[in-house]
Image: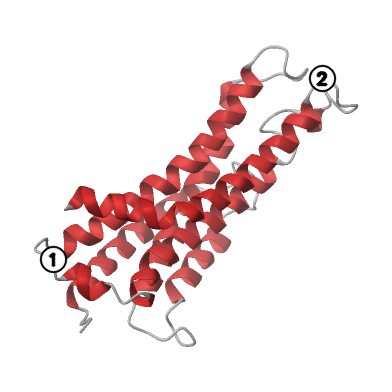
Amino acid sequence: MFRAMIYKELRETWWIAAVAALAYGYVIFTDVRNMGTTSPNAGSAEEIPFLGGNFPGYFGGITFAFFSALGLWQSTSESRHRTWLFLLHHPAARRRIIAAKLVAGAAIAFALPAAAILIFAAWAATPGTHPSPFEWHMTVGSWQDACVVTPFYFGAFFSGTRPARWHGSRLLPLFAAALIFYLLSDDLGAGSFTPAYWAAATLWNGACVVCIFHFMRTRDFS
């Protein structure tokens, strides 16, 4: 049952991943084109992979939108298609069903930006592709950007499971994630997130998971 639920989530969220993959691919393509040896600006400080170009600026925004859309779709599509009642009356416990959705969502959420980073880094590390220096530690900022937006995924998923109206307080968890991001990050650049942000984000993610399990265990879907 657990494996079947994971496959179900993968089938139902592939299109969100496809849209995000196209966005990542476009940003990588533009940087590869601009940083190549034939570019008139090649070799300038602004054209160093992961430090200049479009990738550092757009990667975090794409990941934020992807995580938020994925969390909302996973939790609201069941309500929209009225399949919660069917899913939660399987012999498997509710917590296993919700855990499968979260595991599948987290796997998709992290796999896609990780693939984008590795693909771009593989190109940057290949000799002869560009005239700028490259070291693997230059990718640290992008890995961080992929991690700092996790509160948006859990906040979006939590928003979709709450039994509230959209024009009321249903999106409060997503807004709270945005507030944490705004108040505890120094700025929107790579490497700008303080230890306080990481602590708050970790606590927030854990609180969201606990609340998601609580609401799904106690909510009446009949």
Q: Which of 12 and 23 is in front in this view?
A: 12
Identity of the residue drawn at 21% across and 67% down: 87
- At label 1, counting other C-alpha atoms closer than 10 Å, the crowd grade (few under 14, some 14-19, many 20 or more) is few
Identity of the residue drawn at 44% across and 44% down: 110
Q: Which of 184 and 88 is in front in this view?
A: 88
Q: Which residue lies furthest to the left in this view?
A: 91
Residues under labels 1 and 2: Cα distance? 58 Å
What's the mark number on residue 37? 2
Identity of the residue drawn at 19% across and 51% down: 2
Instruction: Select label 1 or label 2 by which is in front.
Output: 1
Picture coordinates of residue 14, whole percent (x, y): 45, 52
Q: In this view, does 151 lie above or below 121?
A: below
Q: Name the residue under label 1.
A: 90
Q: Which element type, helix, strand or loop, lies under badge 1?
A: loop
Amino acid type of disc 2?
Answer: Thr
Q: Nearer the viewer, residue 137 or 29?
A: 29
Q: Residue furthest top?
A: 127
